[in-house]
């Protein structure tokens, strides 16, 4: 199997990535629940192939304020993970752990940024651990880069990776719930095509 662009992914391959996301985000929900001291549930993640404009719209439009956590993957699986968190989700998590709600996610102090970075490590680590457990491949995660801005601006950062690896990205819609409140969060996966091939080969998909 040789992937020349991400558009070649078929339904079976997307189902594989959906299952990895389901396991990883289930682990993340458990870890976040322990950190926050309150129940964190989640819906079954939905995986879509979206182009840049569609991705921006799924994030609430180009002017919607979000918190972006960008993490690079290295090792046997290379690529980027971009977590997009709604302002309400980020604010509620910060308040639950640090005892006060930030005035704005665009002006987080050092302690709040450190906490958000740890949330990013939990989210990415949960996904990568699920990936490694299923495939036997190793992946390392970088120190998170955190930025609060409008969705259009957040997505401009990894935009060059879109062009290099195809016209679409893997958009994983993973709505977490804090208590009874549904709070939107999304993971955008921009994988290296060779890494996707290794994943599918290890799982006997498309061979």
Image: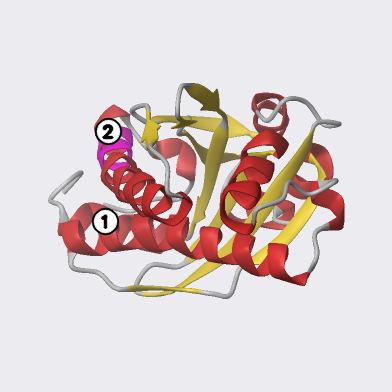
For this rendering, which residue is in front, 67 or 59? 67
Local SS, label 1: helix
Q: Is residue 183 above or below residue 93?
A: above
Question: Circle 1 sits on which residue?
Answer: 130
Q: How many discs mark residues in the rendered view?
A: 2
**In which quadrant of the rendered view does residue 160 lie?**
bottom right
Local SS, label 2: helix
Residue at position x 62%, y 38% in the image: 89
For disc 2, the neighbor class at 10 Å (few under 14, some 14 to 19, many from 20) is few
First in sequence: mark 2 vs mark 1: 2
Q: Which mark is residue 20?
A: none
Please state if 199 lies on the left or on the right of 157 as rendered.
left
Q: Which residues are magenta?
A: 14-19
Please state if 202 lies on the left or on the right of 100 as rendered.
left
Nearer mark to the viewer, of 2 and 1: 1
- Mark 2–mark 1 contact, CB under 8 Å? no
Q: Is residue 159 above or below residue 125?
A: above
Give residue 155's position: percent from left, percent from top. 74, 46
Please state if 127 lies on the left or on the right of 62 as rendered.
left
Give residue 136's position: percent from left, percent from top. 18, 68
Residue lying at the far left in this picture: please name it. 204
How many angstroms separate mark 2 from mark 1 (CA)?
A: 15 Å
Specify the principal SS of the magenta part. Answer: helix
Residue 170, magenta (yes or no): no
Question: Circle 2 sits on which residue?
Answer: 15
Give residue 178's position: percent from left, percent from top. 48, 33
For this rendering, which residue is in front, 85 or 204? 85
For disc 1, the neighbor class at 10 Å (few under 14, some 14 to 19, many from 20) is many
Residue at position x 71%, y 24% in the image: 57
Q: Is residue 106 above or below residue 9?
A: below
Give residue 151's position: percent from left, percent from top. 77, 39
Residue at position x 54%, y 59% in the image: 120
């Amino acid at each position: 199997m040789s992937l020349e662009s991400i558009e070649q992914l078929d339904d079976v391959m997307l189902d594989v990535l959906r299952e990895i996301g389901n396991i990883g985000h289930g682990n993340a929900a458990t870890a976040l629940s322990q950190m926050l001291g309150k129940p964190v549930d989640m819906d079954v993640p939905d995986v879509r192939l979206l182009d840049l404009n569609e991705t921006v719209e799924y994030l609430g439009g180009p002017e919607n304020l979000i918190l972006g956590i960008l993490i690079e993957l290295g090792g046997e699986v290379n690529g980027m993970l971009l977590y997009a968190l709604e302002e309400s989700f980020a604010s509620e998590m910060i308040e639950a752990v640090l005892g006060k709600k930030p005035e704005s996610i665009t002006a987080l102090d050092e302690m709040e940024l450190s906490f958000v970075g740890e949330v990013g490590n939990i989210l990415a680590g949960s996904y990568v651990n699920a990936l490694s457990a299923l495939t036997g491949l190793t992946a390392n995660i970088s120190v998170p880069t955190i930025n609060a801005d409008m969705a259009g601006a957040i997505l401009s950062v990894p935009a060059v990776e879109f062009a290099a690896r195809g016209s679409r990205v893997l958009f994983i819609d993973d709505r977490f719930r804090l208590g009874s409140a549904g709070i939107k969060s999304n993971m955008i996966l921009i994988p290296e095509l060779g890494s996707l091939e290794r994943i599918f080969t290890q799982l006997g998909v498309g061979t």
